[in-house]
Image: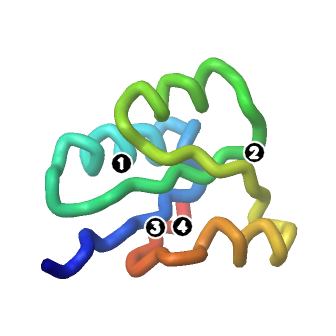
Amino acid sequence: MPSLPRVLITGATGKTGSAAVQALCQRDDVLVRAMVRREDGRADGLRDLGAEVVLGNLDDIRQLRAAMGDVQRLSLI
């Protein structure tokens, strides 16, 4: 059985990003990885929705590459 595609959402603690994470976490055909800049209550809320939370900054190519590991879809917000 093929594995589910993983989608990375950047800007996951913002208004648009968090809405995207919430909508995708309600689906059973994708895995959600949410990229955040810091650990805080908003990151905890994304975990509570079922998202995998990773720390990262779009200005740091190493962090971005690490966040994109095993990701088939990307939403840059």
- Name the spot of residue 4 as percent of width and height, x first: 25, 69
Residue 31 or residue 11, whichever sits in front: 31
Q: Are marks 3 and 1 in contact (CB under 8 Å)?
A: yes
Q: Which residue is mark 1?
A: 20
**Residue type, mark 4 in image:** Leu
Q: Are marks 4 and 3 in contact (CB under 8 Å)?
A: yes
Q: Is residue 32 above or below residue 69?
A: above
Q: Are marks 4 and 1 in contact (CB under 8 Å)?
A: no
Q: Which residue is mark 3?
A: 75
Mark 2, other Cα within 10 Å: few <14 / some 14–19 / many ≥20: some
Residue depicted at x 46% and y 67%: 75
Under circle 1, the secondary element is helix
CA separation in Å, label 4 and label 2:
14 Å
Q: Which residue is mark 2?
A: 37
Residue depicted at x 64% and y 50%: 54
Q: Which residue is mark 4?
A: 76
Specify the farthest residue to the top: 41
In the image, 48: left or right of 12?
left
